[in-house]
Amino acid sequence: MSTPPVEIRPCRECPFTRGRQYRVRQSFAALRDSFTVGEVMTFDSDAWSRYDGITGYFFRHSGRETLRVWDIDDDADIQIWRELFEELPDTVAHNDVS
């Protein structure tokens, strides 16, 4: 009798919420992308690469066909995200017709 494989992943909670918007707080270059202060993106998903030892966080950016990606090493402090991004409050549509 064999047991199913266990995915070994760094003990890291995703700091982003799918569907929420985030603004870039400071311009910076990432492994596969570069970000400019003020850009607003919507968080899409994350993926971990055991081979590369990184987690990629993927964002949708209005007007761009490809996903934006911020990668962070498994050994890096995930709290750095707070220096790079800020979560924006939900926006409420004010054009509702009752």
Image: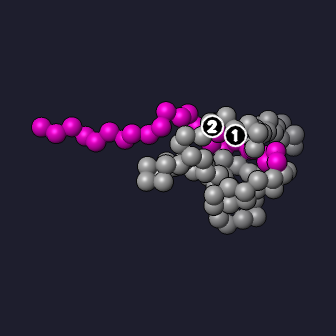
**On screen, residue 91 above or below 27:** above
Count residues near mark 2 (Cα–Cα under 10 Å), then give few for <14, some for 14-19, many for 20+.
Answer: some
Amino acid identity at mark 1: Trp
Q: Mark yes or no: residue 21 visible.
A: yes
Q: Residue 29 location in percent, x, y?
A: 72, 57
**On screen, residue 21 above or below 61:** above
Magenta span: predominant SS is: loop
Q: Residue at x 70, y 49 (%)?
A: 42
Identify the residue position indicated by label 1 in the image: 81
**On screen, residue 57 above or below 79:** below
- Which quarter of the rendered picture does the N terminus lie within? top left
Q: Is residue 6 left or right of residue 80?
A: left
Q: Nearer the viewer, residue 66 or 33?
A: 33
Q: Residue 77 location in percent, x, y?
A: 62, 36
Q: Nearer the viewer, residue 98 or 41?
A: 41
Kind of element beneath mark 1 = helix
Q: Nearer the viewer, residue 75 or 65?
A: 75
Q: Residue at x 75, y 44 (%)?
A: 84
Q: Is residue 42 left or right of residue 9?
A: right
Q: CA distance from mark 2 to mark 1?
A: 6 Å
Identify the residue position indicated by label 2 in the image: 78
Q: Residue 17 location in percent, x, y?
A: 64, 38
Amino acid identity at mark 2: Ile
Q: Which residues are magenta?
A: 1-26
Q: Residue at x 60, y 47 (%)?
A: 72
As drawn, the residue found furthest toward the front would be 75
